[in-house]
Amino acid sequence: MTDRRLANLVSDFADGRVSRRAFTRRAAALGLSVPAIAALRARPATAAPGQTVSRSTRLQSDPTTLIIADNLDGPWITLDPAIIYEINSQAAFNVVYEPLYHLPDSTMPEAFEPLLAEGMPEVAADGLSATIELRQGVVFQTTGNPMTSTDWIFSWNRLKGQAGNPSFLAEYLGVYEAVDEYTLKLTLSAPNAALVAILSSAPLSVTDSITIAAAGGLDTPDTPEPVDVRTAITEGSFGTGPYQVTKFDVTSEVIIERNPTFWGEPAAFERIIWRNEIDPNTQLQLVQTGEADIAYSVDPDAISMVESDENLQLLTGPTLAHDYLALNTLADPGGPLASKELRQAIGYAIDYDGIINGLSGGASLHPATIVPVPLLGAEDVLPLAYTLDITKAQELFDASGLGAVELAFSYNAGGSSSTGVSLDTYLAKLKDDIEKIEGLKINLSPVPAADRLQAYREGKLQFTFANWAPDYPDVHTYAEPFGKTDGAAARRVGYSNPRVDELLDLGISEFDPEARKAIYVEIQQILIEDAAFLVLEQIIDRKPASIAVQGVSTHSIYQLQLRYASKTA
Amino acid sequence: MGLSTYILRRLGLAVVVLLIVSVATFILVHAVPGDPLAAIMGDRAADNPEIRAQYEERWGLNDPLPVQYATYLRNILQGDFGESISTRRPVADDLRQFIPATIELTIAAMLFALGIGIPLGITAGIFHGRWPDHLSRFLALIGTSVPVFWLGLLLSYLVWFKLGWLPRQGQLDTGMAQPNVVTGMITVDALIAREWDVLRSAVRHVILPGIVLGSYAMGIIARMLRSSLVAALGDDYVRTARAKGLRERHVVVGHALRNALIPTVTVLGLTFASLLAGAVLTESIFAWPGIGRYAVRTALGLDYPGLLGVTLFVAVAYISFNLIVDILYGVLDPRIRVS
């Protein structure tokens, strides 16, 4: 009875039929404690049934502010182009700092457009030099300093000099020089058909050389900056993008605000706020309660709830990240895995559909090999993908003549797949699948993540589970590390195929799109045949968002394309 | 020995304890297998020996352990705790940011624990064996036995998600500017700056995590106080006080409670220190930027400088609270003398 009277009282108060004073008096008479009354008094009159609107909700209903719930504490380190190598923070980076070229829509991976360049690069006939005209009239955030070729040289030198994770990208540029105030010239040691894709990568963005140098930033070789300088640069804003950083605290929130001096169309939002929240379920709840507009992650089990909620939409699209199995091809430590027939047999024993639809809730694709869809040639080789065929798997295993085989499978203890599935569950399924081959036994070995990574990098693991994300959106950033003898991934499993090496050299030098595609299709065909890597799934990104959010899409590089985003009231 | 001499001697001993703690922690964290750089180096950088060498030099990992420790100790004396491998920020900056947030949360938890625990304990002690005692003990039992993560999630779901009465996350409303940093504790800083909106928001944000973190201490305090009070109320001096015709309230508060508080104060001091060090789950559930989460992050990332910084802070907290408790003994019971 009291509950009903209380509910009526709250309802009357919410609808404005009862004054605050009367509400307090009557609530106290019903036995509510003072804190409870105070909390109820804070309930605004616009609350939706079943939900209460907080101050944050009012911010969310503000079309000039976009709020994104994301796990910042760990996945975000910096927005400094010379250091950045993290994935989640690319969404903010993409609208704060700008490179010469960008990829507006990652479902069209060839459709690069000039951003701070005036046009596409003029590449010499021999492919060994490229001239790039810079956009004029661009100024840096907060200072208004004009962007010139000097800033580009400084930024790229600084990237190199920091000797950090992304520094290798500057090596692709060969020798670079400023021809004049608005012209850059790159002299390459070999033709590079992926040059525009590389130039679109985040670490090759331009920064305000005058301001960064004044803050203690260095552009000299092999001289990493002191930590206090890096911290100052991380917390500042030195780019040309439509937004500028006003707060960078990954333990609470990151705020970027509209750059009033932006060279293009003014940004739609006055500010975008990333709110720190580790748990994907709470991220979703924040969107449901109206305290955030977008949740960066979502638990696979919650997808149906999002899809059935008329106030929510699911932003979705393929990433270029994948989870794969690495099978060591060397006699030591690969042992029986040195046999191609055994590797292929494993490829045919895996229930890919079960993994994708059963474990990952449909949040992934199954590419044929290490090149994800829609990169060059990936769709052409899809018919060659390994699919579940136990008969064929057994035939291949028997043909290998190895007899009874035991394999040690290492994986990150307590880890999860890229779709958020516990590796203990994931690997139990894989073990079950593979052991359907008679005579083959898998011994699962959970190992601390850092140890496993170290051992994998040193090529000491026989059989393991790993993942890969791109450095830039081009087929070569997969084909080269996985296919090239001594490539970053190939070395870990001792993979080497002279024909692939030869084709990779041809592919990176080939500027004709059709001829280039043919080369990479052949490379992928060989990689499928050699089966040193078996891709389990390519991740599909899914981010719940309020239906008020418009013009936002998932992006395989930027994670969220916010450049064209807006919001209705 | 006078009180001041005693305090000075204890402070001298504290330095020795800290030194031992730092050596032990240094040896232990380096004995853990694994490469702290593996997790933070990208594939390309890890494959480049020159970059790898620069990373090792940056964190002093290329020196022998005794040299690393000597360098660490020398730097600490200059206020330099090194650079965190996981956050890539100076550890001193991290500690300056995270410690006040945890202290603020711990104070809120202790306020809840004391505000509820002491009345519960007194009620149980006075009404020993009757229904208020049973009810108080039941509530205290809930406080001590309910897992923090469960209580945190339950209260979040109910109070934040379903009822919308209190916020769940962080220290302030989204986008709200922090007051000028004086203490690092937002409620205090807001009070100093007289920013009432910020103060209101900060108080609302600390309530839920404060209740969750303080629930265990509340139970302990209530149970400890109850048993001490029950014992004290049966003592001769209490019987004498009653025989003299003192009012019951005066007997309980002025005589029995004062003595019953001594063991409670001991628990209180150590509980405060343990809350400072052990708020990991609460901080994670409520996205509270405190030292507990930092400790987990540094431990998982084998972040030697960060982990050492956290360990030293926890050691300082325990030593300080032990000292405070010992001094409080003398204040509460003049019979206790420093010898």
Image: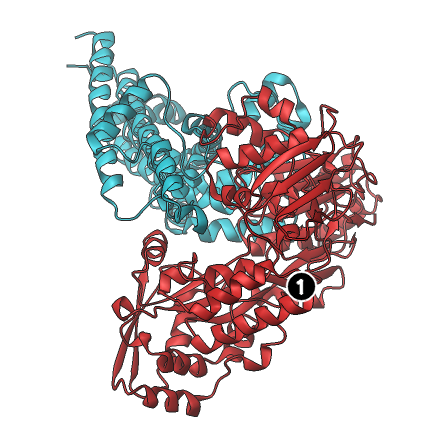
Chain colours: A red, B cyan
Neighbours of disc 1 within 10 Å: few (<14), some (14-19), many (20+): many
Q: Chain of mark 1?
A: A
Q: Where does the image place residue A406, in percent across and percent down from the top left?
A: 26, 77
- Could one spot residue B171 in this view of the protein? no
Q: Quadrant of residue A380?
A: bottom right
Which amino acid lies under the numbered mark 1 shown in the image of this protein? Gly
B76 or A165, which is in the foreground?
A: A165
Disc 1, SS: strand
A476 or A374, which is in the foreground?
A: A476
Q: Residue furthest front?
A: A126
Q: Residue furthest left?
A: B339
Q: Where does the image place residue A287, in percent across and percent down from the top left?
A: 68, 52
A112 vs B196: above or below:
below
Q: Where does the image place residue A211, in percent across and percent down from the top left?
A: 63, 23
Q: Residue at x 70, y 42 (%)?
A: A131
- Number of labelled discs? 1
Q: Residue at x 65, y 68 (%)?
A: A515
A45 or B115, which is in the foreground?
A: A45
Q: Where does the image place residue A350, in percent across and percent down from the top left?
A: 45, 80
A86 vs A349: above or below:
above
A520 or A77, which is in the foreground?
A: A520
For mark 1, what is the residue? A317
Q: Residue at x 48, y 25 (%)?
A: A228
- Could one spot residue A273 in this view of the protein? yes
In screen coordinates, is B151 left or right of A286? left
**Quadrant the N terminus of chain A occupies:** bottom right
A310 vs B60: above or below:
below
In screen coordinates, is B130 left or right of A237? left
